[in-house]
Image: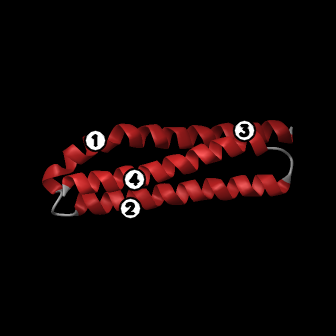
């Protein structure tokens, strides 16, 4: 059971990581004054945040499930490093994009 929950969270994190990597590539390749490209990037950013929110809900459901209460720390220890890395990368990617956008505006 614990392995299944860890596998599920890792799968969800991998999906989020793929979205964030795709977003980072879009910022590097496509960020320009073109409004359609900016709209696409905003949409991809929203997709990342939505996936992150979905992941957090799944994680919360697992943590609150009575079957996993005793194993919560084991689950946290297994997923926390990857989770932290992906959430940090998402935040840094969005922050960098905002800086680039503001620099292009000026």
Locate residue 32, reporting x and y percent.
83, 44
Label 1, secondary structure: give it: helix
Label 4, secondary structure: give it: helix
Distance CA(mark 3)–CA(mark 4): 26 Å
Distance CA(mark 4)–CA(mark 2): 14 Å
Distance CA(mark 2)–CA(mark 3): 30 Å
Disc 1, disc 2: CB below 8 Å?
no
Locate residue 52, reporting x and y percent.
48, 54
Q: Mark 2 points at which residue?
A: 57
Which one is nearer the viewer's eye here, 40 or 49?
Answer: 40
Quadrant, the C terminus: top right
**Looking at the image, can residue 22 be seen?**
yes
Q: Residue 59, located in which quarter of the rendered image?
A: bottom left
Q: Mark 4 points at which residue?
A: 11
Q: Name the residue under label 3.
A: 28
Question: 104 left or right of 7?
Answer: right
Distance CA(mark 3)–CA(mark 1): 31 Å
């Amino acid at each position: 059971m614990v392995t299944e929950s860890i596998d599920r969270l890792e799968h969800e994190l991998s999906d989020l990581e793929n979205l964030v990597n795709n977003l980072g590539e879009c910022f590097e390749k496509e960020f320009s004054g073109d409004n359609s490209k900016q709209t696409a990037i905003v949409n991809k950013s929203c997709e990342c945040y939505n996936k992150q929110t979905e992941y957090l809900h799944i994680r919360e459901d697992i943590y609150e499930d009575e079957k996993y209460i005793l194993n919560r720390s084991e689950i946290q220890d297994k997923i926390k490093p990857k989770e932290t890395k992906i959430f940090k990368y998402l935040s840094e990617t969005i922050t960098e994009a905002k800086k680039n956008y503001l620099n292009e505006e000026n």
